[in-house]
Image: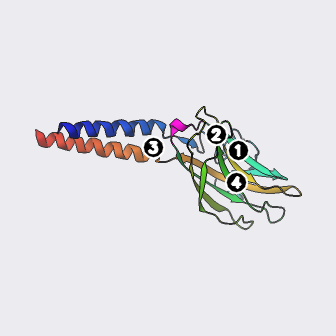
């Protein structure tokens, strides 16, 4: 029984440590992933357009333009925060002069390491509809853990000015905080039942 208690405490410690690291790095309120504040900040390389009839959700969407595009944000991602992330967004291009493709990257502070990116869905960019892009990102060993890593949605070089639109951008650490809370609740309930039976 003593061994079981010590094991349970150890598990609690691991989960609590994980819970402290699990944070939503981009969302509509704190990181403006839906651009609903009407400004691009803290995003770079993108302007914000007000058009509720065109936006994927809400009233605003982001627009990237130029001979190449790099929509980016610096994030407090470090080796201590964990290694696995889920990244998703909606993208669309105009009927003419749209970028043909995109790529996703997460780079450490020194830009000496890139996260391994696994595309879960890879639809082509469309002018007719918003399409969903979803990726798993895993930081490799040797990641620079001093913070301010760069998450980027990049569009390729082109001979002339091209455009792309983004909306509802979300980056979350895996497992999500809600999952950790559920595990903690289940363990607490299990310990309570065990104590009740002993009494």
Would you identify the image quadrant in which residue 36 lies? top right
Do callouts 2 and 4 mark residues in contact (Cβ within 8 Å)? no
Asked if 11 appears above or below 104 in the picture, the reply is above
Q: Could one spot residue 189 in this view of the protein? A: yes
| Residue identifier under label 3 | 177
Would you identify the image quadrant in which residue 199 lies? top left
How has the structure been colored for display? rainbow
Q: Which numbered circle lies on residue 108?
A: 2
Front tag of 2 and 4: 2
Front residue of 171 and 41 = 171
Front tag of 2 and 3: 2
| Residue identifier under label 1 | 72
Q: Earlier in the sequence, mark 2 or mark 3?
A: 2
For the residues labelled 2 and 3, the Cα–Cα distance comes to 23 Å
Front tag of 2 and 1: 2
Asked if 171 appears above or below 148 in the picture, the reply is below
Which residue is most to the left? 199
Mark 4 surroundings: few (<14), some (14-19) or many (≥20) residues within 10 A = many
Q: How many marks?
A: 4
Provide residue 41's location: percent of width, then percent of height: 70, 39
Asked if 85 appears above or below 158 in the picture, the reply is above
Q: Residue at the location (61% across, 47% down)?
A: 115
Which residue is most to the right? 160
């Amino acid at each position: 029984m003593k061994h079981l208690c010590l094991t349970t405490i150890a598990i609690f410690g691991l989960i609590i440590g994980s819970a402290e690291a699990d944070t939503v790095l981009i969302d509509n309120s704190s990181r403006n992933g839906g651009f609903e504040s009407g400004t691009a900040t803290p995003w770079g390389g993108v302007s914000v357009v007000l058009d509720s009839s065109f936006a994927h959700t809400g009233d605003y969407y982001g627009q990237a333009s130029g001979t190449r595009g790099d929509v980016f944000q610096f994030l407090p991602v470090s080796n201590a925060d964990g290694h696995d992330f889920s990244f998703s967004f909606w993208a669309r291009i105009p009927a003419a002069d749209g970028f043909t493709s995109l790529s996703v990257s997460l780079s450490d502070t020194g830009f000496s390491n890139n996260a391994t990116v696994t595309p879960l869905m890879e639809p082509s960019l469309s002018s007719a509809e918003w399409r969903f892009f979803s990726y798993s990102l895993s930081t490799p060993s040797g990641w620079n853990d001093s913070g301010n890593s760069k998450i980027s949605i990049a569009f390729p070089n082109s001979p002339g000015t091209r455009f792309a639109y983004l909306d509802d951008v979300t980056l979350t650490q895996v497992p999500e905080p809600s999952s950790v809370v559920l595990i903690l609740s289940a363990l607490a309930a299990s310990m309570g039942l065990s104590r009740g039976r002993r009494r």
